[in-house]
């Protein structure tokens, strides 16, 4: 994507490719980086070794009006076997021609700012329901389906084992409670579960986000115990909605984890993932767990039990993210702390996610460390407590979003 600094009338672009070229693409334009207009015919080039130098294109831009942003949207790679170009596309130069605009430094897009008044409830789901199992409100939630392979992220990018479904046996409301059930040997799958999001239904920037949750899964043998169904991975979190934009994606979209419980019933974690601080390098903290040279030990905060009803909360604004349990703050991450490591990308709309995964890199890293897990294992290395107690269910009483007005 190119930012011209100001809207301009664009007549053409000239593209010089490196070895890795795109064999099919279009040029798109925008004025807000969210809504894109197709501005050229589809450019189709040969591939599989038939492309000859020079790797250069001149493309007419046909969209009327003035535009600040322009990008090349590749839909197919071209590559020659053996030269490595099958792994991506690579431009040498991208030139834009037209009239108007500004030759100066592009003006920054102003950041959104939170309100200054009191917090007010702006969105909620109380999961109102009776004794008969019922499906979620489709105007608020959508189901993720699959194991991630359709988007090139088999195991959802984390080596997870479950297949997400929209089955009422995996995701259902009953007696005013949302249930997300992780099941074994179900629907011709080794493991099934549920993942629901508000993407396309509700997104928001800044506010106080809270959910009341409990887990119906075996407990660790006591506070500080290194056993339990480690691998049952329930979470309440958000992603920047531009995670689905191929020019952004994760971690540039940003991720805010309000709660991740990986099978120990006495601690959970909260974190920020973004450019320069993602995956194992995320910024956050764990409630009541400390890491020592001899492994994890119980911290000195108030006792936490994942099997009890708990209020998991995050307050988020332009300069900080604050994590709370039952109204008590246990970790505040400042913008300065983030920018010392990477980019602050937490200034744009996010959507909510609730899910229960099974296994995956995060819980496996703890379970496979003998200093952190001493419980019984199955022959394939999974927690016996987890394997012998299906289904495992995350129950949600309500989810609420507040913003300052």
Image (cartoon, helix red, strand yellow):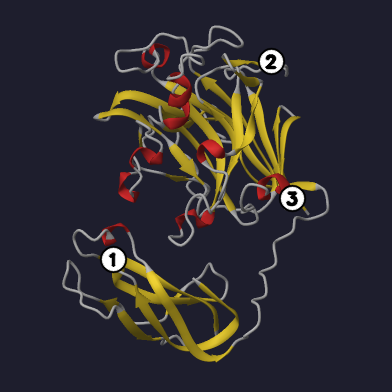
Q: Nearer the viewer, mark 3 or mark 2?
A: 3
C-alpha separation, residue under disc 3 versus residue under disc 1: 40 Å
* Residue at 20%, 58% in the rendered image: 82
Residue designated by label 1: 76
Query: Is the C-beta separation of discs 3 and 2 under 8 Å?
Result: no
Q: Secondary structure at mark 3?
A: loop
Instruction: Classify residue 13 as left or right of residue 311.
Output: left
**In the rendered image, which quarter is residue 108 located in?**
bottom right
Of callouts 1 and 2, which one flags the residue occurring earlier in the amino acid sequence? 1
- Can you say whether 390 is above or below 143 in the image? above
Query: Mark 2, residues whose alpha carbon is within 10 Å: few (<14), some, or many (≥20)?
Result: few
Residue designated by label 3: 319
**In the rendered image, which quarter is residue 15 located in?**
bottom left
Q: Nearer the viewer, mark 1 or mark 2?
A: 1
- Can you say whether 287 is above or below 37 in the image? above
The residue closer to the viewer here, 376 or 57, is 57
C-alpha separation, residue under disc 1 versus residue under disc 2: 53 Å
The residue closer to the viewer here, 10 or 136, is 10
Query: Mark 3, residues whose alpha carbon is within 10 Å: few (<14), some, or many (≥20)?
Result: some
């Amino acid at each position: 994507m190119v930012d011209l600094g100001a809207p301009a009338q664009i007549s053409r672009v000239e593209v010089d490719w490196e070895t890795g070229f795109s064999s099919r693409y279009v040029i798109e334009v925008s004025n807000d980086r969210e809504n894109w207009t197709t501005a050229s015919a589809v450019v189709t080039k040969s591939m599989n070794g038939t492309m000859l130098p020079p790797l250069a294109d001149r493309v007419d831009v046909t969209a009327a009006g003035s535009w600040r942003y322009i990008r090349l949207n590749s839909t197919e790679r071209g590559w020659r076997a053996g030269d490595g170009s099958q792994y991506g596309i690579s431009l040498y130069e991208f030139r834009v021609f037209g009239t108007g605009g500004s030759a100066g430094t592009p003006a920054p897009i102003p950041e959104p700012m939170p309100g200054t008044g009191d917090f007010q409830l702006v969105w909620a789901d109380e999961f109102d329901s009776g004794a008969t199992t019922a499906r979620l409100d489709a105007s608020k939630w959508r189901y993720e389906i699959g194991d991630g392979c359709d988007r090139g992220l088999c195991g959802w990018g984390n080596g997870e084992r479950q297949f997400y479904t929209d089955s009422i046996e995996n995701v259902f409301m009953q007696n005013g409670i949302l249930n997300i059930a992780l099941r074994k040997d179900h629907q011709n799958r080794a493991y099934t579960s549920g993942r629901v999001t508000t993407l396309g239904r509700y997104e928001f920037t800044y506010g106080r986000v809270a959910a009341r949750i409990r887990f119906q899964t075996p407990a660790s043998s006591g506070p500080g115990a290194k056993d339990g169904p480690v691998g049952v991975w329930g979470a309440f979190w958000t992603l920047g909605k531009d995670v689905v934009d191929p020019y952004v994606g994760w971690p540039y979209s940003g991720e805010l984890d309000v709660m991740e419980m990986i099978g120990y019933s006495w601690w959970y974690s909260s974190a920020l993932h973004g450019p320069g601080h993602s995956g194992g390098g995320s910024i956050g903290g764990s409630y009541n767990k400390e890491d020592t040279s001899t492994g994890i030990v119980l911290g000195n905060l108030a006792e936490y039990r994942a099997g009890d009803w708990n209020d998991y909360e995050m307050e988020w604004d332009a300069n900080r993210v604050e994590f709370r349990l039952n109204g008590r703050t246990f970790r505040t991450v400042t913008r300065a702390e983030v920018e010392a490591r990477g980019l602050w990308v937490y200034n744009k709309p996010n959507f909510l996610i609730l899910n229960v995964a099974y296994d995956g890199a995060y819980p496996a890293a703890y379970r496979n460390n003998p200093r952190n897990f001493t419980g019984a294992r199955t022959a394939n290395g999974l927690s016996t407590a987890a394997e012998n107690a299906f289904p495992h269910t995350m129950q949600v009483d309500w989810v609420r979003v507040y913003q300052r007005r």
